Image: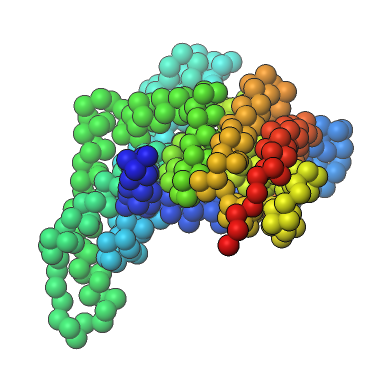
Amino acid sequence: MDTFLKIAGKLGSQKHLIAIRDAFIAMFPLTMAGAIAVLLNVLVRDIPTNMGWTGFAEAMKPLIELNGYVYFGTIAIMALAFVFALGYNRAQAEKLNPIAGGLVSFAAFISTIPQTLTIVTDLTGLDKSVLTKLTNLGLMVSGSNLETSQWGVISVAYAGATGLFAAMLIGLLSAEVYIFFMKKNVIIKMPDSVPPAVNKAFASMIPGIAAIYVSALVGYLSTLLTGQALNDLISTYIQQPLMGLSQGWFSVVLLSFLVQLFWFFGLHGHNVLGPVMDGIYLPALLENTAAYEATKDVSQLPYLWTRGSFDAYGQMGGSGVTIALIIAIFLFSKRQEYRAVAKLSAPMGIFNINEPITFGIPMVLNPLFVVPWLIVPPVCVGIAYAATAAGLIPPVYVSIPWITPPGLYAFLATGGNVMAGLVSLFNVFVAFCIWAPFVIAANKVQAPQD
């Protein structure tokens, strides 16, 4: 057990994982702004259109277009924002210039993105003489398609959710090169009379140039040796396999169980496993958002399970689905200390804040409630996963604030799907049925005396 706690402690304090976790947290204002834009368009465009209220959707067109601009400025360029935050956090953790660290990682990532965008136009129906003239002009005509390349375009395929893994790896690489040269004091030193801002800028010059060139060289060699951009290689051979593994029922249930296990031993489960949950399931959420924006069809969403799915179906009231525990205590507990904690915890539990009951009972190393504490969330996410896989409910594709009450969270996170909200509430009922026998059994245990 000591070995487990030591490993968990090291995992939770690992500096690179902390930087990744904090970078995802820093992006929260962007993800929420983009999510609000998507959700508003669902409410004023998609739902009214599906109900035949096309006139209402047409009247809301200015708002719909405005939401499109917000989406493009947030979720569509998420990888760019993330890589800056990652470089910033790594430099700050090493007590170096964080702005320079962020900018260097940002520039390094941009230097690996393909510099051209190929546009394919269907030429079906054009006269053969026209196709011949296009070919003579040097344009690439393949069959019935015209291909043109535009230099200087950054595709959202690399700047958005799909590019997050590449941003993570390239951001860490460039940040480490920058930090290495800074710590080795390979810098340009200016006289003390120079203003501090100028001094910092010159000090970061050589490390920054080295970091950007190293990243650009890696990207260049990738294209030269494999014919594929570094970002595409990372997506194909790292991101997609990891995302695929994360989508299995066992993976989802196991991760939910591990979160509870860390909590049981007094470690913040979401903080310890945050880099895993955010690093894998948050890109899945953002890609689902992007897919919905492109198709307006929930059947075309690429991932069954996303970061928001855990909160929607397995964290109602907080870790352990403690909103169900509070209800069970009100109905069945005869222990006054439990009832007092439940009364204080209920208002916050509705908004998924469960520290009062988690530490008031308490749950840490509590043998009375270890079984429901560990199994309730895995059971709930297992039910929701099965319902999603069966097509009963759509996958989560809208980022929702975690304080949104149970049922309503799932309803909004799935674009207003009523069945999703009912599944969330059904999970609360299932959790109640699991918690209740243990609450009743706790009545027979004498409370510890001071």
Looking at this view, name the residue that lies furthest to the bottom.
Answer: 193
Q: Vertical placement of 276 versus 16: above or below? A: above
Count of picture labels = 0
Can you tell which quarter of the image residue 297 is in? top right
Task: Please give left or right for residue 370 compared with residue 418 in the image.
Answer: left
Task: Pick whichever, 278 or 398, lies toward us.
Answer: 278
Task: Please give left or right for residue 258 compared with residue 421 in the image.
Answer: left
Task: Please give left or right for residue 91 compared with residue 303 in the image.
Answer: left
Instruction: Please state the horizontal and vertical placement of residue 183, each as a whole percent of the image.
Output: 17, 61
Q: Can I make out residue 437 in this image?
A: yes
Residue drawn 33% across and 63% down? 92
Task: Please give left or right for residue 393 compared with residue 286 in the image.
Answer: right
Task: Pick whichever, 310 or 139, lies toward us.
Answer: 310
Task: Pick whichever, 1 or 305, lies toward us.
Answer: 1
Q: Vertical placement of 291 versus 12: above or below? A: above
Q: Vertical placement of 150 versus 15: above or below? A: above
Instruction: Please state the horizontal and vertical placement of residue 317, each as a whole percent of the image.
Output: 67, 47
Residue drawn 47% across and 50% down? 266
Instruction: Please state the horizontal and vertical placement of residue 436, each as a whole percent of the image.
Output: 73, 37
